[in-house]
Image: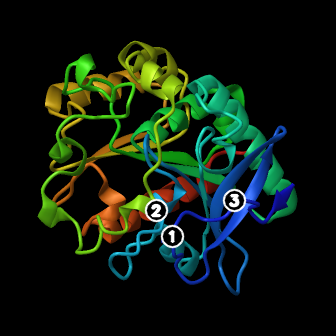
Amino acid sequence: MTTTVPVPPPAGSALSPGVRRITLDAAGLGLSALLAEPEHTAPRATVVALHGGGMNAGYFDGQAHPGQSLLALGARLGYTVLALDRPGYGASAAALPDGLHLAGQADRLSAALDAFSSARATGAGFFLLAHSYGGKLALTAAARPDGRGLLGLDISGSGHRYAVPLDALPDEHGHAGPWSRTWGRLGLYPPGTFRDSGARVAPMPLLERREARRWPELFATVAARVRVPVRLTFAQYEAWWLHDEQAVTELRGHLAGARSVAVDRLPGAGHNISLGWAARSYHLRALGFLEECLALRESAPPGR
């Protein structure tokens, strides 16, 4: 079922016009989310936005500059956009104080989307748009047998080999090293971004921090099972992940079973793309990729 969210919003968390808070029943676990729907038409498809570690769904509804919000932009262009607080964040944080491993998150995500589609029109289906740790969840979800029904994946700020040693990953207290590693240069973000960031930042659960260290070994198994189209974007000033030509070639090789693989680089952006000046550019490119996925779906022979 889908209901209004039963917990008060984070302090200072204003929403873009047309965006509202809901809660989804994910097999008995309440997952909070932000929702924006087309005002006058049925949705072409539903974009499911998955935030990174230490953030929440508000990451996709930036308020520091007009046009920054993925939720508002997607709804204007005819898509439903559902930005979920991943398990262990938002309304589910109290029930899951240590969070969930990726496999458990994928189970809850599948249940939440089933609940959503039973109550609302979703158009041609679900398209996962994910950032950072959310990209790991998107790949894990697509690797499941039921993940082959997804329209595609658009992932930013996530790769397969870290550009930092494992002991530089977030520690037990959530510390993640130099500020510039996560954000890049200050000038990449509109004024007011950091003043309002408290509404979008959340503690990174223990199980996520531990599993993050295992991602380079988990990636190959997960990626080999992905069959839907995949697009990955690395910011110009991405510092968490290797994204040189050798790394990109390796990454493509692991995703050889996907229907298509595209790798893009976004100039003038740091790791947190959707909160920067480059947010609108990235969101438009991602929605353009969704249109390509819709065209692929429409051109597929019957039965495929």
Q: In terms of sequence position, does the residue under pointer 1 or pointer 3 come before the other?
A: 1
Q: In terms of sequence position, does the residue under pointer 1 or pointer 2 come before the other?
A: 1
User: Where residue 212 sits: x, y (%)?
Assistant: 41, 24
Answer yes or no: is residue 88 visible: yes
Q: Are the residues at dot 3 and dot 2 in contact (C-beta closer than 8 Å)?
A: no
Residue occupied by mark 3? 124
Q: Quadrant of residue 187?
A: bottom left
State left or right for residue 183 relative to residue 24: left
Badge nearest the viewer, 3 or 2: 2
Badge nearest the viewer, 1 or 3: 1
User: Where residue 237 sits: x, y (%)?
Assistant: 15, 48
Residue occupied by mark 1? 13
Residue occupied by mark 2? 199
Q: Identify residue type, mark 2.
A: Ala
Colouring of the image: rainbow
Q: In terms of sequence position, does the residue under pointer 3 or pointer 2 come before the other?
A: 3
Within 10 Å of the Cα at label 2, are there few (<14), some (14-19), or many (20+) other Cα atoms? some
State left or right for residue 91 relative to residue 155: right
Marks 1/3: CA–CA distance: 31 Å
On residue 259, the disc is: none
Marks 3/2: CA–CA distance: 32 Å
Q: Residue at x 24, y 69 (%)?
A: 277
Q: Quadrant of residue 302?
A: top right
Classify mark 2: helix, strand or loop.
Answer: helix
Outermost residue to the bottom: 40
Q: Identify residue type, mark 3.
A: Ala
Q: Identify residue type, mark 1.
A: Ser
Q: Are the residues at dot 1 and dot 2 in contact (C-beta closer than 8 Å)?
A: yes
User: Where residue 40 sits: x, y (%)?
Assistant: 70, 87
Q: Residue at x 32, y 66 (%)?
A: 279
